[in-house]
Amino acid sequence: MKGDSGADELLVGIATLASALLTAAIGSFRRGAALSSGRHNRPIRPRNAAFIDVETTGLLEDDRIVSLAIILVPVASIPGNVNIKFTHEIYNPGRPCHPGATEVHGYNDLTLSKQPVFSKTAADIVATLASADLYVAHNAEFDMGFLERELRLAGQVLPVRPRYCTRLEHRRREPRTSASLAAVARRQFLIRSGSRHSALEDAYLCARIYLSQQGLYESFPLSVFPNLEPTNYRGPPRPLPPPLHPLAHKRVAFAGHLTAIDRAVAKRHLVKLGAHVTTTLNHDTDFLVVGKGNSSKVIRAEQMIAEGRGLRILKEDAFILMLEDDWI
C-alpha cells in the first residue's frame, strides 16, 4: 500500500507538471498570436510613432531595399501642434530589380546604380528610429523584415520597439474586406497621387490609417512634404506620372435609365479607367450616376449624403463630361 501511495504521488506530480507546461505553452502561443496581430506590448498613445515603408528589388529574402521612408509623428501631441519629421532616401541595391518591382516603384537599374548605398546613412537611420516608441507599417512583417536585414548587412542593429501592423488590424476589424494599402486608404477617401508607389506617400497613408484606427482623426495633408522624390536622389528629375482620372479607383453605381450612352458601354469605359462598377449602393460607393426615372437608390443616396458620407450624385450629363473625350 505504501508503494502504491508513492506511485500515486508521482503520477499526481507528473500530471501537475504537464498541466503547468501546457498552460505555459498556451500562454506563449496567445502572446505570439497577439504580437503578430499588432495588439501586444504596444502603447495605444505612444509619444512618437515611426511610420515606415520600403520599396524593394523584389519579394525574396535576397532582395534589397530600393527606397525607405520614415515619418515621425508625435502622437501624444494630437490634437495640437503636430511637428512632422521624415526621412526619405533611395539606394543602390547592388543587384537588378525584378521587372515587376520596377513597374511598382518606377526606378530602373541604371537610375539605381547612380544612387548612394544604404550603409552610408544606416547609422542615421538607427538614430531616427531610436527616437520612436512604436514602429507602424502596413504589412509590418514585410517592411520591418527588409529594414532589419538591411541594417544588419550594414553592421547596425534595429532598436527594439513594439510593432503595429495596420494591415493586420484592418483584417481583425473587417475580415471580409480587402486589406491592401490602397483599399484601406480608399475607405478614408485617400488615394495615391499616381500609379507609381512612393515609399513616402505609402508611409503617409499608413500614418493616416493608424491614426484613424486609434480614433485620432488628425488630418495632416500630403503637402507637408516638399515632394515625393527621395531627398538624396541623384539624377535629373523624373517625369511625373500621368494624373489619375477623377473616376479611377472609385466605386460607381447606376440608377435610372441612361439616354445618352448605353449603360453597358458606360460600364466598359469605367473599367478601362480603373473604376469599380457596383450594382448596390453602400458606404463604399463614391458616385451614383443617375439617369431618367425614379429609383430608390437616389433616395438612399440623399440620406447617405445627409449622414456625411463621401458620396456624390452625378446626373448623366455631368457623368459624360467626366469621361474621356473618346468615350463614344
Image (tube, grey):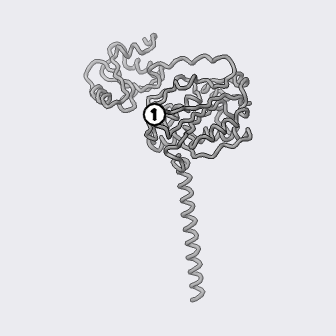
- Res. 283 image quadrant: top left
What secondary structure is found at the residue carrying circle 1?
Answer: loop
Q: How many marks?
A: 1
Residue 264: x and y, percent? 39, 20
Most extreme residue toward the bottom is 1
Residue 201: x and y, percent? 55, 28
Could you tell me the amino acid type at mark 1? Glu
Residue shown at 28% from the left, 18% from the top = 292
Most extreme residue toward the left is 294
128 w.r.t. 11: above or below: above
Residue shown at 64% from the left, 35% from the top = 59
Residue shown at 62% from the left, 33% from the top = 54
- Res. 97 image quadrant: top right
Disc 1 crowd rating (10 Å Cα; few below 14, some 14-19, many 20+) is: some
For the C terminus, the image quarter is top left
Residue 233: x and y, percent? 67, 23
**Disc 1: which residue:** 218
